[in-house]
Amino acid sequence: METMRGIGGGVSRRAGARGARIEDPTEPIMGEYPSTFRIRQLLDAPRVADVELEVDRELQRLRLGQTIRPGQSVAITAGSRGIAGIHRILRAVVRHLKALGAEPFLVPAMGSHGGGTAEGQRKIIESYGITEEYCGCPIKASMETVVVCRAAEGFPVHFDRHAFEADHVIVCGRVKPHTNFVGDIESGLMKMMLIGLGKHNGALIYHRAIQDYSFGRIVRSVAREVLERCRVVAGIAIVENSRDETARIAAVEPRAFEQREKELLELARKWMPRLPFSKADILLIDEIGKNISGTGMDTNVVGRKYVDHRAAEHESPKVRHIVIRGLTSSTHGNAAGIGLAEFCKSSVLHDMNVRTTRINCITGGHVTGATLPLDYETDREILDVALSVCGLTPARDARLIWIRNTLDIIELECSEAYYEEARTRPDIEVLTEPRPLPFDEAGDLPTMAALAVAES
């Protein structure tokens, strides 16, 4: 006698010779899940103790008072990424410039983010604490650009009008590996001069040009024109550690942007957060968002930089299925990158601003980043399906990793399949014993943060 049910229909069992029920380990058992335990990664994490003091020290090295005269205006870029302490860093830049007698102001510099509107972009930076009151200077938000010239490749070079009309410009941004492109220059000051200060008009043109040429070529081509024509006086480059903290701040002269970025990118690669294991059947992510990464989740962390739904042959980690459980509040409904996941909770789609997400993904040339995964109302429903498509591995033995987001992976949950390895690794501290997944009565899991508090 056999009982057979499909993926959504429950347990498959076979009767033995005397009618005993024998479990077939190759077939999914609905309602059975791996136990998980919490670990802490022990990673190299250098940290700047006082970011405001460090900003001032770095800017003093450049002797900007020899170039910036009292009464002159200085535009300072404020991007859309959730950079640690960015409000304090920008306030320190403002204070340094005011001490020189200059008149600084902030410019939202973020391509098409915020729905491609000035109001939306201002709202984004204010959500990071970057306000006129806190920073002590005006915020001038506009989507209007000036075409300063044509690049060697023939397309127009756009630049934020407020920044173009300023006497000087300071470019501030984080240097890190890009989520889509590979090279000796990726995300940083050079990219900020293109996509950030180019606003929506520039971002559209540059991403199209990148498809015909290459990221490296277009970055260098446009940056060359901007540095020559747009009165950039300095850069503030930020590198973060694996704990999402400020690890290095460097004030950079415009002529040194390219070389310094190459050096800082190597440090960023060394210090960036990583998942502790090279393979996973399921990766649960509590939240994605533009404040976390350009693709909502950092593809360098989840192993999907080259292909949306699998790791490239040379890429690690190799994650079979990604589950998105929520959006950050700071992303304001922008779910760019959702298309990299196989599953999500239905609430993610309810919270998603479809128009904003599509504008951002289309502008960035990553249209599939806005496509929708399979959605289910509860975590239990998602796991029932996800565990059923993980090959022959029994559900209880599945390799599951559960993180808050791709910036915050020092402490995370892992399934029992990793337990013996974790106990022997010098770079991992095991914080709990394996225990059942903490579903509530509705079939949902808490957030990682709530689980940590409940067990503290």
Image (cartoon, rainbow, N blue to C red):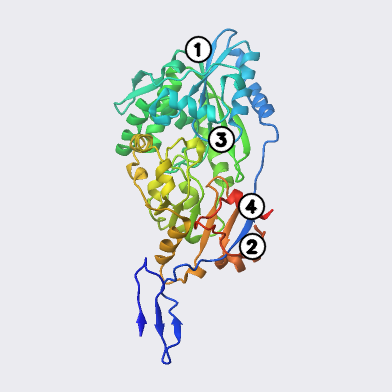
**Residue at the image point whose x is 56% and y is 46% from the top:** 272
Q: Which of marks 1 and 2 is nearer the N terminus?
A: 1
Q: x, y (%) of residue 50? A: 70, 32
From the image, tell me which residue sits under label 2.
425
Disc 1 is placed on an element classified as loop
Q: Given the image, on which type of amino acid does mark 2 rest? A: Arg
Report if the CB atoms under discs 4 and 2 are less than 8 Å apart.
Answer: no
**Residue at the image point whose x is 54% and y is 57% from the top:** 440
CA separation, marks 1 and 4?
50 Å
**Mark 1 or mark 4: which is in front?**
4
Q: x, y (%) of residue 303? A: 46, 53
From the image, tell me which residue sits under label 1.
167
Against 220, residue 1 (above or below) is: below
Disc 2 is placed on an element classified as loop
In the image shown, does 193 or 397 lie closer to the viewer?
397
From the image, tell me which residue sits under label 3.
83
From the image, tell me which residue sits under label 4.
452
Report if the CB atoms under discs 1 and 4 are less than 8 Å apart.
Answer: no
**Mark 4 or mark 2: which is in front?**
4
